[in-house]
Amino acid sequence: MSAFQLENVTLRFGSLAAVDSVSLSIEPGEQVAFIGPSGSGKTTLIRLLNTMRRQDEGSLSVFGENVIEFSDRRLRELRSLVATIPQHLGLVPNLTCLQNVILGKGGSRGTIRSIRDLIFPAHDDQLAVHEILDRVGIEEKLFERISNLSGGQQQRVAIARALFQEPKALLADEPVSSVDPARARDTVKLLTELSKERGFTLGVSLHHLELAREFFPRLVGMRNGKVVFDGAPESLSEEDLEALYELSDEEMMEDA
Ligand SMILES: Nc1ncnc2c1ncn2[C@@H]1O[C@H](COP(=O)(O)OP(=O)(O)OP(=O)(O)O)[C@@H](O)[C@H]1O
Ligand SMILES: [Mg+2]
């Protein structure tokens, strides 16, 4: 059973196919980087994979289940199985790291329980969060408010929040867009190490091609909603790169 299986999946915004007839399988435990220029459909693909969006055409299964057949309840369960780190992290600035991480399980625990967990975190949760913050290197920030942390530290809290869900898959959309190159490298390295350690499937969209090549055994390259490359970084040729990133005549005209 694949973690994600797409067959001819299309999602349109008006007349634009943001994801255009994509067929793709991602196996449990695989680590995949989604690359490609701005507007190529990476974020839209991630939203299909985490079921925040439904496809217009084609079929998509997540861990063996066809998403079209999901009930709302099953969707909620699935969303805790597939953790997502959005580009802007989605942390609550006035709450502490502990509270933000605990909120990660909110979806699967129900409203009343999550409010109680937030105000009176259970001892077990506190220990678990402490252990996770330790693993991501910011254990001393347990009771610190998010607004007092640097961008790189906030990324680590967002990773911790996803880990706390004990997901079977973790999707991260441009997780390193707002930090310096050294910290970006550390974060990508951490994500791939965690995926190996804990066995979850990892899908990350990345503008940093070099980081994608260094840390991911599989790259999926998108252009205009289509997958135009799918393979190991060693097999990404100059022609592939041109097909992915080179400006078309039309785009050059727009720039002129
Ligand atoms: N909610 C929306 N409504 C209308 N069009 C959208 C919407 N979301 C995305 N699009 C369009 O779909 C296409 C793909 O967008 P998407 O955000 O998936 O690209 P991306 O590869 O993530 O780009 P970037 O690298 O800039 O984040 C773009 O042309 C975009 O303008
Ligand atoms: Mg995007």
Image (cartoon, grey):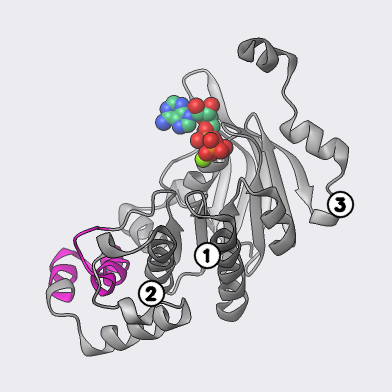
Q: Main secondary structure of the magenta part?
A: helix
Magenta region includes residue 113: yes
Q: Residue at x 52, y 47 (%)?
A: 46
The Cα atoms of the two marked residues, 2 and 1, are separated by 12 Å
Q: Amino acid at mark 1?
A: Ala
Residue 59 location, x and y as percent?
A: 58, 43
Q: Amino acid at mark 3?
A: Ser
The Cα atoms of the two marked residues, 2 and 3, are separated by 35 Å
Q: Residue 111 is drawn in which quadrant? A: bottom left
- Answer yes or no: do the residues labelled 3 and 1 have beta carbons within 8 Å? no
Estimate how packed mark 2 is, as few (under 14), some (14 to 19) or many (20 or more) residues with alpha carbons within 10 Å. many
Q: Earlier in the sequence, mark 2 or mark 1?
A: 2
Label 2, secondary structure: give it. Answer: helix
Q: What residue would you read off at disc 3?
A: 235
- Between marks 3 and 1 in the image, the one whose residue lies nearer the viewer: 3
Q: Residue 125 is drawn in which quadrant? A: bottom left
**Could you tell me if residue 130 is visible in this image?**
yes
Q: What residue would you read off at disc 1?
A: 169
Estimate how packed mark 3 is, as few (under 14), some (14 to 19) or many (20 or more) residues with alpha carbons within 10 Å. few
Residue 254 location, x and y as percent?
A: 62, 12
Label 3, secondary structure: give it. Answer: helix
Identify the image quadrant of the C terminus.
top right
Q: Is residue 217 left or right of residue 146?
A: right
Q: What residue would you read off at disc 2?
A: 164
